[in-house]
Amino acid sequence: MKILTINPNASEIFNELLRNKTSIYALPSTNIKVVSPKSAPQVIEGIYDEALSIKSTIETFIDLEKDFDAFIIACFSDHLATYAIREITRKPVLGIAEASIYLACMLGEKFSIITTNDRWGPLLKEAVRKYGVETKCASIRTVGISISDLEERDNKNVKKAIENEATIALCKDGAEVICLGCAGMSRFDKELNKKLGVPVLDGFVCAIKLLEIFHQYGLTHSKINTYSKPLYKELTNLQSKFSKVYKKSKKK
């Protein structure tokens, strides 16, 4: 199968981290391409940044869809582009937050998310509520760094801060599973798994493995209501490619 991973930010360092993970965890029969949109914030650290990235993320999907079987939106937010793209394709589309959170629920009674800065706390709390697993979430802990700090490959202080917050989540909050709440934390999962002795989940790898299951089992999202194709409407000052995805052509 062929999976397109769209990283909604413009960080090529994060893209390379994701590519390294694909070489380790993807099946030999799975080919994964990692790209960023042509226009995007360098990193995404809040609602405004995410909003700026939505249109270009959707455009990237429209331009490349025909060459791929499934798609990953590699931002640990409840990124709106994930749901918009599900409306305009019959192929499966996963976000890395939902992939890791749903898997975490099967690996322990409660999970905690360790993420970057305090701005993410309320956003991820809302995402957990939306996913219907609020009672399974022990805590959402932040390490007080910017996402750009994760671009430093050998930042020992960042690694230690993540480990410290994960330890508190396990010892004080009652967590049994840890979700790493940023694609830039991708390289820390197995090291923390060994140190902490509990499952530590990288959402990108979780999304890859789920999509491989979907592909083998012949599954995709239901198109009855929520992800049914959008109805035709006029678009002002937008490229024609955005109109081609609509359910019906304009009536003459």
Image: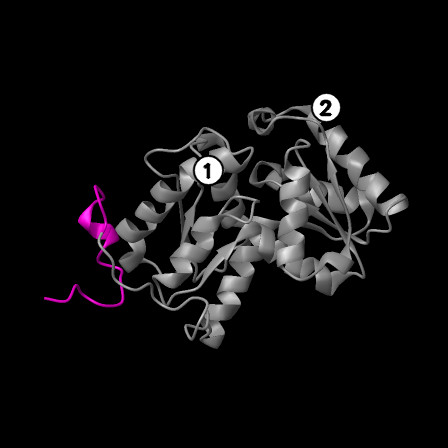
Q: Describe the element under mark 1 as helix, strand or loop.
A: helix
Asked if residue 114 is positioned above or below residue 101 in the image, the reply reads above
The residue that mark 2 highlights is 157
Q: Is residue 248 magenta?
A: yes
Q: Is residue 193 magenta?
A: no
Outermost residue to the left: 252
Q: Are the residues tagged 2 and 1 within 8 Å (C-beta)?
A: no
Magenta span: chief secondary structure: loop
Disc 1 marks which amino acid? Asn
The circle drawn on residue 15 is 1
Q: Describe the element under mark 2 as helix, strand or loop.
A: helix
Disc 2 marks which amino acid? Asn
Asked if residue 178 is positioned above or below residue 249 in the image, the reply reads above
Residue 51: x and y in percent read 45, 39
Q: How are the colours assigned in the image?
A: one colour
- Magenta span covers which residues? 235-252
The residue at the point 41 percent across, 36 percent down is 52
The residue at the point 41 percent across, 43 percent down is 54
The residue at the point 56 percent across, 32 percent down is 45
Crowding at mark 1 (Cα within 10 Å: few <14, some 14-19, many 20+)? many
